[in-house]
Amino acid sequence: MTENLNLLQEQLYSAVLVDILDELGYRNQGMDHTIRPVDPSFKIVGYAFTILATDVYEIPKEPYKKELQAIDELKQDHVVVATTNGSTSSGFWGELLSTAAQVKGSRGAVIDGLTRDSEKIREIGYPVFARGYSPYDSKGRTDVIDYNVPIKCGNILVFPGDLVFADHDGIAVVPKQLIEPVLQKALEKVNGENEMRKALQNGMGVVSAFNKYGIL
C-alpha cells in the first residue's frame, strides 16, 4: 500500500479531494486553516491513528504513559492525528516523538495543538502540521487520555482509519468508507484539469474551456 500512497501523494492535492467530497455532500472535510506545516514542503497522505489529549495541572505518577503506548502502536502508513482539546499550554509534539513515529513507518503527524523542536523536525524530514510552537514540555501540562478513538481535530470529526491528506493548502479528511470512490473521482478530476490546462495554454477562452471540461 505504501507505493500506492506515494503515487497518490505525487498526483493529488488537498483541494481536489475537498472538491470531490463537496460533490458527494460532505462539505466539511477540510481541517481548520490555522493548522499549518512546520515546513512549507511537507506533504502527508496516510491513515489516521488518533490521539486524544487534554490539559492536566500536576505531573502524573507515570508521565507520558498513554502517549508512549500510543506511539508504540503506530504501524506503517499511519498518520498521527492528535488533539489537545484547544490547549496551548505546551509543545505537545516534538523531535523525539517524530523520530520514533518515523521509524515505525508513520507518514506524518497532524496536531491540533502546538509542537516544539521545529528545526529538528525539519532536519529529520518527518512531516508535522500544527497550530504553532511552544518550548514547554507536555509533562504536567498536557496528557494523553486515550487513542485510536474518534476525535475532533481541526473542527473535523476524525475516525481511526480515515484517509488524511495534508499539503500547503490544507488538510483533507476522507471518511474510510468513502476512500475508494473519492480517490477514483479525484484522479479523474486531475486528469480533466490537466486537459483543461493544456487547452488554456493553447489559447482557449476560459468560458469555452469550462463549458467543455466542466472543471474549475
Image: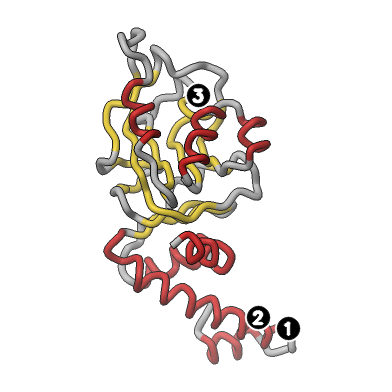
Left or right of residue 155: residue 148: left
The residue type indicated by label 3 comes to Gly
Pair 3/2: label in front: 3
Whether pointer 2 and pointer 1 mark residues with C-beta atoms closer than 8 Å, the reply is yes
- Callout 2 amino acid: Arg
Residue 65 is labelled as none
**Neighbour class for label 3 at 10 Å: few (<14), some, many (≥20)?**
many
User: Are the residues tagged 1 and 3 within 8 Å (C-beta)?
Assistant: no
**Picture residue at 54% right of the left edge, 67% below the top:** 7
Q: Residue at x 44, y 19 (%)?
A: 138
- Which percent across, then down, holds residue 105? 48, 46
Question: What residue type is disc 1 on?
Answer: Gln
Q: Is residue 18 above or below residue 59?
A: below
Q: Earlier in the sequence, mark 3 or mark 2?
A: 3
Q: Position of residue 50 (x, y in %)?
A: 34, 41
- Give percent across and percent down for residue 136: 52, 16
Callout 2: 10 Å neighbours few (<14), some, many (20+)?
some
> Which secondary structure lies at badge 2?
helix
Residue 91 bears which disc, if any? 3
The N terminus - image quarter: bottom left
**Circle 2 is placed at which residue position?**
197
Q: In this rendering, would 58 be left or right of 2?
A: left
Answer few, some or many: residues within 10 Å of disc 1's Cα (few below 14, many 20 plus, some between 14 and 19): few
Q: Nearer the viewer, residue 156 or 98?
A: 98
Please report contact status of discs 3 and 2: CB closer than 8 Å, yes or no: no
Q: CA distance from mark 3 to mark 2?
A: 42 Å
Q: Looking at the image, which residue sits at the far right?
A: 202
- Report the residue at 40% width, 25% height from top: 87
What residue sits right under mark 1 in the picture? Answer: 201
Q: Earlier in the sequence, mark 1 or mark 3?
A: 3
In this picture, is 157 found above or below 185?
above
Viewer-proximal residue, 50 or 193? Answer: 50
